Every structure is written in C-alpha cells, then in structure tokens.
Image (tube, helix red, strand yellow):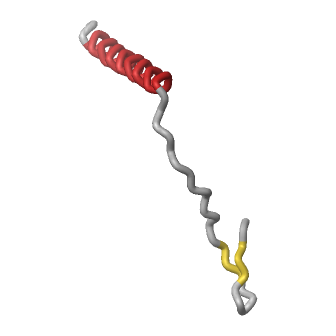
Amino acid sequence: MPYTKEDGGRLNNFAVEPKMYRAEPPTKAQQRNYVILGVLGLLLVSGTIALAVYASNAS
C-alpha cells in the first residue's frame, strides 16, 4: 500500500488516484455490436418471461 510521510514522521495511508484519460466515443463497429447485444439481451429476457408465463398456465 502506498503511504505518504508527513513532516512529523507520521505515515498516512491514502488511496492512489488513477491516471486521468479522455474517453473516446465508440466506433461504428462498437456501436453495431452494442445494438446486437441489446437485441440479443431483449430476446433472452422476453423469452424467459414467455416461458415463465407458459409454465405457470400449463396446469
């Protein structure tokens, strides 16, 4: 762990601040992948809900 030493010799334990960087906007390929993953996730959730509804009404 990183410690800082004060004038009196006391040690303080502070969190190390991460380096700052500028975020770059997603490329066209990344945007396409986000849309595909979103659609697949929506299909998975809606399919799971439909299966639960079907199973609850199967009696």
Residue at left offset 50%, top offset 40%: 24
Question: Above or below — where is 24 with respect to 6?
Answer: above
Residue 42 quadrant = top left
Residue 34 drawn at (x, y percent): 44, 25
Q: Residue furthest bottom?
A: 8
Please identify the quadrant where the C terminus is shown: top left
Residue at left offset 47%, top offset 33%: 26
Q: Return the residue nearer the eye: 53 or 33.
A: 33
Question: Above or below — where is 32 with respect to 23?
Answer: above
Q: Residue furthest top?
A: 58
Residue 38 drawn at (x, y percent): 39, 23
Residue at left offset 50%, top offset 45%: 23
Q: Return the residue nearer the eye: 44 or 23.
A: 23
Residue 17 drawn at (x, y percent): 60, 63
Residue 19 quadrant = bottom right
Q: Return the residue nearer the eye: 59 or 55.
A: 55
Q: How many marks?
A: 0
Residue 12 quadrant = bottom right
Question: Above or below — where is 9 with respect to 38?
Answer: below
Residue at left offset 49%, top offset 22%: 29
Please identify the quadrant where the N terminus is shown: bottom right
Residue 35 drawn at (x, y percent): 40, 22
Question: Above or below — where is 30 with respect to 18?
Answer: above
Q: Residue furthest right?
A: 9
